[in-house]
Image (cartoon, rainbow, N blue to C red):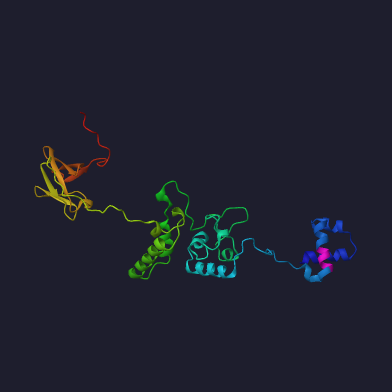
Amino acid sequence: MDERLRFVARLLDGESMSEVCREFGISRKTGYKIFTRYKDQGLEALTDRSRRPVRYANQLPPQIESQIVALKQEKPHWGAAHARFASSWYAAWPVMSASPRRAPSTPSCTGMGWSKASAGHDHAPTAHHCPAASLPNDLWCADYKLKQEATRPPGMNSLQQQARFDAFVAEFNNERPHEALGMKTPSERYAPSPRPYVGLPDLTYPLHDRDALVTACGRICMHRKKISISYTLAGQRVGIKEVDDGIWIVSFMHYDLGYIDLEQKTLQPLDNPFGARLLPMS
């Protein structure tokens, strides 16, 4: 305001508009605009004016804005796009649903920190942004969001922390829309397999010397020696066949897992027991 006041004062002293504008570094058009406002409104016209737009192109009705703000307060980690699809007003607002990846730039979204992009530019990634991925599994950000929402700050004890984990899982699967799923929730897209899982059949190894049951600790017993196989095979039967003096091959179903050396009491696994197998030549 002080600069404008000095500018007007020099004009009132009789100096020319061109000379004063040149010294103040403004155009003559701006100079005449300032001087005209002063003559119409007095000193009040020299104060800084609000740069807020007169109207917003996509401004929502007040009841919808209040619903957005309430949802933001309830779900502070949700972005504008997620909240938009989760709101009950989305289906009744077709103008705003034209682009599912662009959040509505409303006064409520901007004021609550949801929309921070200048006109004509995309939104910059925020702390909760999931980067684009080339593989389907890379699209899931559950591990990062779990840390952000369920562990910061952590629960006071294990029971409270588990309750926060359970609440996160329920929200992540049933409430939060996911862009990778077409803004659907996982529970909406999930369908149980039509084929029931009946487990493995009883395993037999007629071409092996013997079979052995893997204990709960992942071991088998041979010649009064305990040999570690794998916790994964606990409760399953494996086939054992001697291929050399003191050397035994261990198989599960039709996969050879590795060799047992009774002297060292260890299993030497194959590089890739579940890889492609060569068919025998006819």
Q: Is 32 on the left or on the right of 221, as rendered?
A: right
Magenta span: chief secondary structure? helix
**Quarter the N terminus occupies:** bottom right
- Which residue is found at the position 59% from the left and 68% from the top? 61
- Which residue is found at the position 12% from the left and 46% from the top? 211
**Magenta stretch contains residue 36:** yes
Q: Is 15 on the left or on the right of 174, as rendered?
A: right
Q: Which residues are magenta?
A: 34-39
- Which residue is found at the position 38% from the left and 60% from the top? 187
Q: Position of residue 202 (x, y in %)?
A: 15, 49
Quarter of the image for residue 108 reads bottom right
Q: Is 107 on the left or on the right of 5, as rendered?
A: left
Q: Looking at the image, is 56 positioned above or below residue 198?
A: below
Closest to the observer, 260 or 274? 274
The reply to whether residue 151 is in sight is no
Q: Position of residue 180 (x, y in %)?
A: 45, 53
Q: Is 251 on the left or on the right of 12, as rendered?
A: left
**Magenta stretch contains residue 26:** no
Q: Looking at the image, is 118 positioned above or below residue 69?
A: above
Quarter of the image for residue 246 reads top left
Residue lying farthest to the left in this orientation? 223
**Quarter the C terminus occupies:** top left
Q: Position of residue 35 (x, y in %)?
A: 83, 64
Residue lying farthest to the right in this orientation? 14
The reply to whether residue 148 is in sight is yes
Q: Position of residue 256 (x, y in %)?
A: 20, 41
Closest to the observer, 2 or 104? 104
